[in-house]
Structure formats: structure tokens, C-alpha cells
Amino acid sequence: MPIISSNSKLIVALSGGPDSVYLLNQLLKLPKKSQPTIILAHFNHRTRGQISSQDKEFVNNLAQHHKLPIHISQAKNITKSEAKMRQDRYEFLEKIRQQESADYIVTAHHQDDQIETIIFNLLRGTGPQGLTGMKPIYNFILRPLLDTPKKTITDWLKKNKIKYRLDQSNQDTIYKRNLIRHKILPLAEQINPRYQQSILRTARTLSAQQNYIDQITQKLIKKNPTYKQVVPIISLKKFVTLHPAIQTNLVKTVIAPHVPANKQLSAKTIEEVRNILLFSRGGSQKILFDTLSISKKNDNIYLRLLR
């Protein structure tokens, strides 16, 4: 597992399901010299009534059994929106990470989750970056199981007679990811029994290409300590000579860190900004999310935070 040592302090997201229970056990199996400080965190979405309460009781007992501290919280409002549930969960986890001064939030996303994410992004509409899937390390999130197949997890739990909770809502195809898991992937297997390896191989290829584009982009962006003032990002004359892929990535790179947590930076928005910078008259600007503007003036492209 990367970047995990005895000096690490981790917030481990524990739902009580097989994946997170497996993750916790693998962390606890690490050699003593590499054993991190583990703090558990459980978020109750309240979508399954009494069963959700039983999940909470299960993880609380698990924490007591392993003598680990645990933070438990629940959603204020019940929602069926996958995006809102994800947002609520990560806001809670990040709050605990900051409160505990931890290094990372550790989640149990595995190889099958990675494949579903790539397919979901493709069907929703995405650029090459979306087809690279989740990153093992992203900001303060650590995903050490991304190379671990789901079958490895369930086989290990069965062999070691480890108890866990089953979420029956994972069978409900009202959720888009479940629809992919239970309807689309079985069809993909009929077309190519090794579809998983093929998708992951494609993701690795695109990831290598994206890393190269990212390196070029970072070299092009003017170094500025803050965007609180109007600051130049790159010369407009330079921007128009770049390959469209570099232009798109540059726009995304400078905007993405300033997107509000409850908003999403779409490929359509990125393309709109790119077109303004390329084709509109001087002095044009684009207001994004009511929080920042990107504009061009005097042969420079500028970014400014509005609040």
C-alpha cells in the first residue's frame, strides 16, 4: 500500500460492507513498523431505515473490537441522488480529516469500481482524463485497493470467516452504477470475456498520455502565488498556437481548483471557455459558478476569484 507508514495518520471510510471491512483488515495486517494511526469514520445516509441503524451498530462494535476511535455522522436529509450522497459523505470525511490533522482519507474503491467508473464517465460524456478512472492518490484521498478485484476481496473474507454487512440497495438499478454493474457489464462480458483487462489497459494508456499533457500544461502556466487578484495565466498569442488538447487541458487545470464543492466542471463549460479565448473579441470574459472569471485582455489570459 503506497505512502502508508508508522508516521501516517489515516481516516478510514468504513461502511461495514465487504470492501471497507477488507480494507480495514489489510491495514491492520501491516507490519508493526509500517502500522499507521487508524481513525474510523462512518456516514449513515439513512436510506434504508432500521438497516442503516444496524450498519452503524456493526461498525461501532467493529471499532470497539479493534480498539480504534470512530466518528459517526448521518445525513440531515434523505436523498436518492448518488451525487448528493457522495458529496455529503466526502464533506464529512474531509471534516474529520481536518479535525484529526490526518494525512489521508482512505477508501475501499477496488478494481471493479474502477471499471464501472470508466464506463460511467464514458456514457455520461467525458474527455481522455475521465477515461483514466480514479487515481490511487488524489489530493487527500488514498485508494490502495484499485488493483484488487472484487472477487479477491470476497474470497479472502469468506476464507477468513470475516463478518460484514450487505447493502441490498446495491441491487437496485434505480442507481446508475448498479445499472452498469448488473445490466451493462454482463453484456460486455458476452462480447469480450476479458473486457475488464481491456478497459484497464486502455485506461493505463490514456493515463500515460494525460500525464504527458499535464506536464506540458504546467510548464506553460505562468507561476502565480494566488488568484485573489487579477493575474495573467498565459500569453494569448502563445495559447492560440497550442494543440487543442493542450488548450483544453490548460483551461481545465486553471479552473478546476476553484470549482465549488457542489458544482461540476463539465466538458461543455471547458469548451465554451476555450472558444471565448480563441474567437471572441478582446476584453471578453466568462463568469463561472458565480465565483471566478476568466478573460482575455492585452495579449494575456487572466483568472480572477470573485469571492
Image: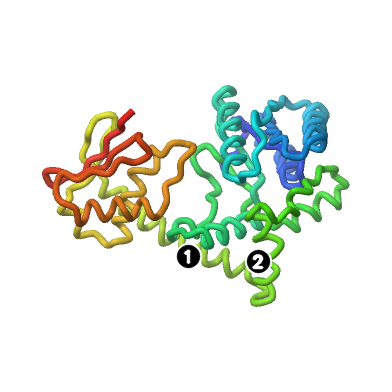
* Foreground pick, 135 / 16: 16
Q: Quadrant of residue 291?
A: top left
Q: Is residue 148 above or below residue 287?
A: below
Q: Secondary structure at mark 1?
A: helix
Q: Mark 2 or mark 1, which has the lower sequence index?
A: 2
Q: Residue at x 61, y 60 (%)?
A: 115
Q: Quadrant of the C terminus?
A: top left
> For this view, does 56 lie left or right of residue 139?
right
Check disc 1 and give the amino acid type.
Thr
Check disc 2 and give the amino acid type.
Ile
Residue positioned most to the right: 161
Residue 86 at x, y percent in the picture: 60, 41
Residue positioned most to the top: 99
Q: Secondary structure at mark 2?
A: helix
Residue position for label 2: 184
> For this view, does 40 lie left or right of residue 248?
right
Q: Quadrant of residue 82?
A: top right
Q: Is residue 288 above or below residue 191?
A: above
* Foreground pick, 206 / 33: 206
> For this view, does 12 lie left or right of residue 247?
right
Q: Quadrant of the N terminus?
A: top right
Q: Residue at x 27, y 44 (%)?
A: 286
Say which of marks 2 and 1 sits in front.
Answer: 2
Residue positioned most to the bottom: 191
Residue 222 at x, y percent in the picture: 24, 42
> For this view, does 189 lie left or right of residue 211?
right
Q: Is residue 226 visible?
A: no
Label 2 neighbourhood size at 10 Å, few (<14), some (14-19), many (20+)?
A: some
Residue position for label 1: 205
Residue positioned most to the left: 298
Q: Is residue 293 visible?
A: yes
Q: Is residue 205 above or below residue 307?
A: below
